């Protein structure tokens, strides 16, 4: 019998606008109804609480959460994780470290906290949804290194997934998160580079559930005080600039989407505030 899984992927921009994000998750229907929310950039401040732990406590209705660190600094760390409802059962989680760049170009240095290459990893969580095994790969690829490096990272990740396949013959795989496929969504070059990265997964049988979405991030919409480029970004805000990119994607294998993935908004056609990324939602028929 067919089952439905409602999944959201959301880069929280390190939870810098926590109260807004909490409000959205509690009140916006596509977020409130999600069975699984895959989160990138959950924050753990030194001596403070994990963003996901706070959300699980503060949101209405029972939530469970899991988390794995991705980037560590002296006063904090950021990572990927999941919020999920009782309709799904967490079975196991695996971290897949991703290849790093050797050095940063000048643009990457401008945007990279700490001035050294980030560590990057994917967090793979296996869920049981009814009688189906669903493996959700929550990833955050590198901004540094360009599309060639992102291709290498995704190729490495998929090879590791092939080596660690669930025993179920009818298991479902979902790749979701921040692929950092940077460049203006209006740029033909950026679109071609994005397609080249995604083709690594499409060639292995994944379907692009988010292909119809134009853009998922506006660089100037929300500024992290810890961003090394914050002064330039604030100038862009003053000038009312927009730099919209399609950074976030949902790819699926072993199931089909009831409808194409959508950008979650609180008001029709209005971007959701609280992060420089927009959440994406999809409903899968398992």
Image (cartoon, rainbow, N blue to C red):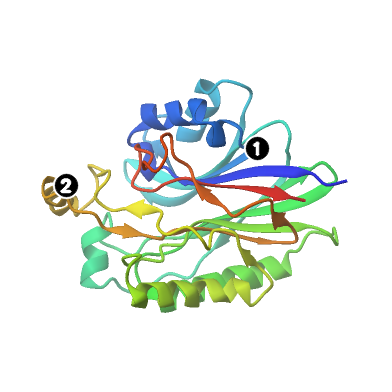
Picture coordinates of residue 44, whole percent (x, y): 42, 37
- Camera-side residue of 199 and 107: 199
Q: Is residue 40 above or below residue 266?
A: below
In the picture, residue 154 is in which quadrant? bottom right
Tag shown at residue 35: 1
Label placed on residue 195 = none
Q: Position of residue 4 (x, y in %)?
A: 74, 43
Is residue 47 rendered to the left or right of residue 154?
Answer: left
Residue at 23% from the left image edge and 54% from the top image edge: 242
Mark 1 → mark 2, Cα distance in angstroms: 35 Å
Q: Residue at x 41, y 35 (%)?
A: 267
The residue lying at 32 percent from left, 72 percent from top is: 187
In this rendering, the count of numbered labels is 2
> In the rendered image, is residue 3 in sight?
yes
Circle 2 sits on which residue? 237
Task: Say whether residue 6 is left or right of residue 238.
Answer: right
Which residue is most to the front?
268
């Amino acid at each position: 019998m067919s089952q439905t899984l409602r999944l959201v992927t959301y880069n929280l921009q390190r939870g810098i606008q926590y109260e807004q994000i909490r409000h959205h998750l509690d009140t916006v229907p596509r977020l409130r109804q999600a069975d699984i929310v895959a989160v990138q950039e959950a924050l753990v401040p030194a001596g403070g609480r994990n963003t996901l732990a706070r959300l699980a406590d503060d949101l209405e209705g029972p939530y469970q959460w899991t988390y794995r660190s991705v980037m560590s600094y002296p006063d904090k760390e950021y990572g990927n994780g999941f919020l999920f409802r009782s309709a799904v059962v967490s079975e196991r989680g695996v971290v897949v470290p991703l290849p790093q760049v050797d050095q940063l170009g000048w643009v990457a240095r401008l945007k990279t906290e700490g001035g050294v290459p980030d560590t990057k990893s994917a967090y793979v969580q296996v869920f049981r949804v009814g009688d189906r095994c669903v493996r959700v790969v929550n990833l955050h690829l590198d901004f540094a290194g360009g599309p060639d490096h992102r291709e290498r990272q995704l190729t490495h990740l998929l090879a590791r997934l092939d080596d660690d396949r669930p025993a179920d013959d009818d298991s479902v795989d979902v790749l979701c998160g921040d692929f950092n496929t940077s460049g203006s969504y209006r740029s033909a070059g950026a679109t071609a580079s994005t397609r080249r990265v995604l083709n690594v997964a499409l060639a292995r049988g994944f379907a692009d559930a988010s292909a119809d979405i134009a853009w998922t991030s506006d660089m100037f919409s929300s500024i992290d005080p810890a961003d090394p480029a914050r002064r330039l970004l604030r100038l862009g805000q003053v000038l009312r600039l927009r730099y919209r990119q399609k950074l976030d994607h949902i790819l699926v294998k072993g199931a089909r989407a009831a409808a194409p993935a959508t950008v979650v908004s609180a008001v029709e056609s209005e971007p959701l505030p609280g992060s420089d990324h927009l959440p994406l939602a999809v409903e899968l028929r398992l």
